[in-house]
Image (cartoon, grey):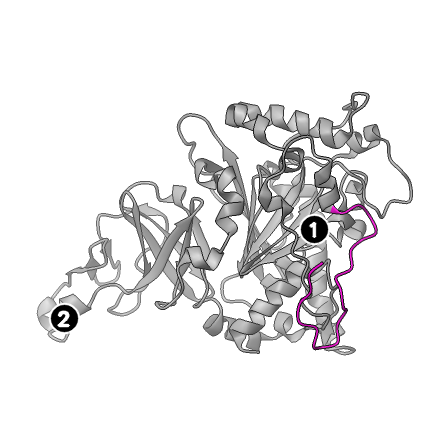
Amino acid sequence: MSKRDQSNGGVSAIRRSPGISYQKLLDQDSRPVPDHLRIDTAVFLGDHDIPVDRYIDPEFHELEKTKIWPKVWQMALREERIPKVGDADVYEINDISIILVRVAPDTIKGYYNACLHMGRSLVDRPCNLGEIRCPYHGFTWHTNGKLKHIPGWWDFPQVNARKFSLPEVKVATWGGFIFINMDPDCEPLDAYLGDLNKHFEKYLFSERYTAVHVVKVLRCNWKTAQEAFMDAYHTVATHPQILTSAGDDNTQYDVFGNCSRAITPVGTPSPNLDWTPTEDDIAANAYRPRDSSAGVKVPPGMTYRQYGAHLAREELRTMIGDKADDLCDAEVMDSAFYTVFPNLHPFLFYTQTIQLFKPYEDRHDMCTMEILYLRPFQGSRPPPAKPHVLGPDQSFIEAPELGVAGALLCQDEWNVEKVQRGMHTLRMSKPGVTLGVYQHTQVRHFHNLYDRYLGL
């Protein structure tokens, strides 16, 4: 097991659950396992409390607006939302609005969404543009950002057309996602993502379409919300109904530069159970977002993990053909949840799920959680699903397109707003939240990067 700097007097080694390790589960796989799953980077990231003020104090929201959001690569849109030349859409983060427009078949540009005349937003909704024209006074730019026309130009002798182009932000793509960065001196996206592409290249996110897009407004800080999905430790109390078929304590946590991951095995029981389920018990309980395994009987001599993998491959065959035969049991059964700092959470394999968290409008105490299901397809690319927006008084259960995942999300949703309120009370007795050393690896990794950006 690897270690990290322990000068703060922390533990001397990374402890693991007494249950079977994820790597030992991989040893039992019926097929060769990809190299990226054999990476096991248990690192000591500290045992200190995380200051509660950063979740509830508006001052931290303002710090993030100057030191994080303008400095990081952040996912703005899927490319499929602006497929044709001239297609444009808007990305907003806090009080900043950015236009993304496809100016050529393989070129996407990003501009600050404000007229250089009096600041009126130039684009308000998805559209196709032949030019970018301010609705207020008619100042107009070409889609490449160059100034085209000013009504009554005679009255603006101070305007130099060559210098009056729309200010750009950095734009790059990965896996069908459009990323932006407002820092002109930022590192390239590929460098920022590090080895992430090596982990995902087999699963071809760029060749999927958005089948489901749900946006939920939550009454909590964006960090509070996303941390509810960055560990399997909460499963035993929040999602006890899945313990028979989900190895929560068997989860492996890893970090890679600006990214981290948690891999939870499915089709194996939780070490937290005080009874031993049969393979049929596991099959009956198995939580699978693409179908229901209730009533499945496991053939003699097989585990449900093996048989469930067989069923999953047959299901995937209708979408990816014989490529399904090359997928090991882990690739079709397990939940591998990545975090790309600061707020993007893509799931590996064919789990389909992408999660994105960001502040709601310009609020420190509210956020949005976006859920996308990216599905493989054959033939022409289907159109992307339109966002289904759920307000703060609605529940995930009101988005039936989420399938059975909606019920789990409701359980998480029930927690996060109470956590946000409870932190104000917590501050009266202790200054921070207490995290596990290993099972909160992703959360600790996030806060280490957060501290670095804020200079703390």
- Dominant SS type (magenta): loop
Label 2 or label 1, whichever comes before in sequence order: 2
- Dot 1 amino acid type: Gln
- The answer, for residue 348, to whether it is visible in the render is yes
Q: Which residue is mark 1?
A: 252
Q: Which residue is mark 2?
A: 160
Residue 358, percent across and down?
A: 53, 59
Would you say residue 229 is visible in this rendering?
no
Figure check: 290 above or below 426: above
Residue 270: quarter of image:
top right
Q: What residue is shown at x 75% (from left), y 34% (from top)? A: 286
Q: In the rendering, at what x and y percent does residue 7 appear?
A: 70, 77
Q: Is residue 241 left or right of residue 115?
A: right
Q: Can you tell which mark lies on residue 273?
A: none
Residue sitting farthest toward the left: 154
- In depth, the one of 157 and 19 nearer the eye is 19
**Which image quadrant for residue 253?**
bottom right
Residue type of the residue flagged with mark 2: Asn
Q: In which quadrant of the rendered image does the C terminus lie?
A: bottom right
- Residue at the image point whose x is 51% and y is 27% from the top: 320
Please give the range of residues in magenta: 1-21
343 to 375, vertically: above or below: below
Viewport quadrant of the N terminus: bottom right
Q: Does the magenta segment cover residue 91?
A: no
